[in-house]
Image: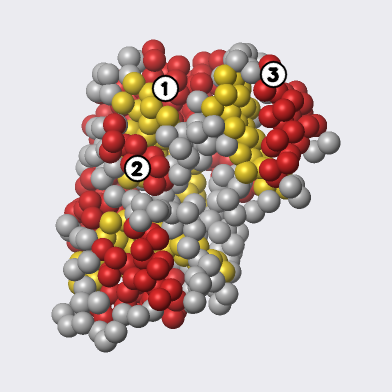
Amino acid sequence: MTLTCFKAYDIRGRLGIDLDESIAFRIGRGFARALDARRVVLGRDVRASSAALSDAVARALIAEGAEVLDLGLSGTEEMYFATTHFGACGGICVTASHNPMDYNGMKMVRAASAPLDAQTGLATVRALAEADAFGPARNGGHRRDVSAMARGAYVARVLSFVDIAALQPLRIVVNAGNGAAGPTFDAIAEALAAQDAPLQFIRMHHEPDGGFPHGIPNPLLPENRPPTARRVRQEGADMGVAWDGDFDRCFLFDHRGDFVDGEYVVGLLAGVFLAREPGATIIHDPRVIWNTLDVVQRAGGRAVQARTGHAFVKQAMRDHGAVYGGEMSAHHYFRDFVHCDSGMIPWLMIAQAISCQGPLASLLAAQRAAFPSSGEINFTLADPEAAIGRVVSAFEPLAKGIDQTDGTSMDMGAWRFNLRSSNTEPVVRLNVETRGADPAPLVAQIAAVLVP
């Protein structure tokens, strides 16, 4: 049986078509067998189907003789942290993050929270699950609730990234999107209050609800941002924070309610880490780079480019000993958080930066002016490959440099663009950045070639 839910670096599929409890059971046994796993951390998001799928995975792991350390409702990053914290052989979070309601999936890591290599680790899990030739259950497997212990250790690690004594009184709007973020955030807020942190939080869409009454939480989409922006302005808040469904990404709004594009957050966090560790290495993705390169160069750091995607960035973090890595899509990776991404650490670090240096808008003003960007623009096209070919043919003669690390990036001197096709749908994604100019006319030039 061919399993269509296996994607490049995780599992994602339509319920009842690509993924169901029986398939989840096979994947769980394949995961345990591929990693020879004796101990596995298991978490799940708030989707209506996640509890049943998680139970199926747990039964499979137990059938393979593994100890299942159950986090219950949790964020993907809590699974990442717990995998290393408990010395587990691997970890699984049942989640579809920001995908549509009829989807679910799994994110997986091996020992030390390292990504499963797509060509070997994940391929082995897939081959075993498709063959479904596991034989009788093994002895010794069992399931243990470690949710309270794991969350306490996780909260302590997250708070270790900030100096709580340096925090000033701030009002912060937090939008959990009815995803998994609410309970974890509350644990962090409680720990902050216990240490007299002067932060006031205005919660919205906070209760976990797998029906997502306010829509699937994905603040990367512009149409999903206005509720948070309005609330920031209404409350006179210093900052707004919104998360996706499994909260491994967080999105920021300044005190005016303006959305902060991901590349500027990457630059800001890179600067914070380089102030702490001069000369450190920063990982970035290839889509929008000039702001990050400028910040890292001025701070005396070393910038290393990695392919887009969590598996590539996590491996680059390890390979280069990087202190921090960031993608413009709001994934932020931290050496001291098991080299993995977190949606809770970034907003805390930004709160400290605001406390010490002033409003977020002021911290970003110079960089926004120096390196304006278009944001990611998606084009649905019948033939993405042909459309990209037209753009390459039109602009290559004028380009000062071409990079194909991820899609096609062209440096035109005063401006730069990255164009890449989606792996899962007939969509072409465009990002344009400039040296001080309005990117809109340049976007229009490229769009005219993409969609003649």
* x then y, percent, for residue 400: 60, 15
Name the quarter where the C terminus is drawn.
top right
For disc 3, the marked residue is 397
Looking at numbered disc 1 in the image, what kind of residue is underneath it? Gly
Judged by depth in the image, the label closer to the viewer, 2 or 1, is: 2
Q: Position of residue 126 (x, y in %)?
A: 41, 66
Kindly identify which residue carries mark 1: 358
Out of 50 and 12, give the one closest to the viewer. Answer: 12
Q: Residue at x 29, y 61 (%)?
A: 91
Tag in front: 1 or 3: 3
As helix, strand or loop, the secondary structure at mark 2 comes to: helix
Left or right, residue 88 beside residue 303: left
Which secondary structure, mark 1? loop
- At mark 3, the secondary structure is helix
Ranked by sequence position, the earlier of labels 2 and 1 is 2
Q: Residue at x 49, y 77 (%)?
A: 1
Relative horizontal placement of residue 33, taking residue 103 as reference (left or right):
left
Asked whether residue 240 is in view, the answer is no
Q: Amino acid at mark 3?
A: Pro
Is residue 324 positioned above or below 218 on the image?
Answer: above
On the image, which quarter does residue 23 sit in? bottom left
State how far apart marks 1 and 3 are (Cα).
Answer: 45 Å
Q: Nearer the viewer, residue 223 or 59?
A: 59
Q: CA distance from mark 3 to mark 2?
A: 35 Å
- Amino acid at circle 2: Lys
> In the drawing, does residue 53 fall left or right of residue 352?
right
Mark 3 is surrounded, within 10 Å at the Cα level, by few (under 14), some (14 to 19) or many (20 or more) other residues, namely few
Label 2: few (<14), some (14–19) or many (≥20) C-alpha neighbours in 10 Å: many
Label whose residue precedes the other's in the sequence (1 or 3): 1
Residue for badge 2 = 314
- Residue 413, horizontal then vertical, whole percent: 61, 13
Q: Residue furthest bottom?
A: 136
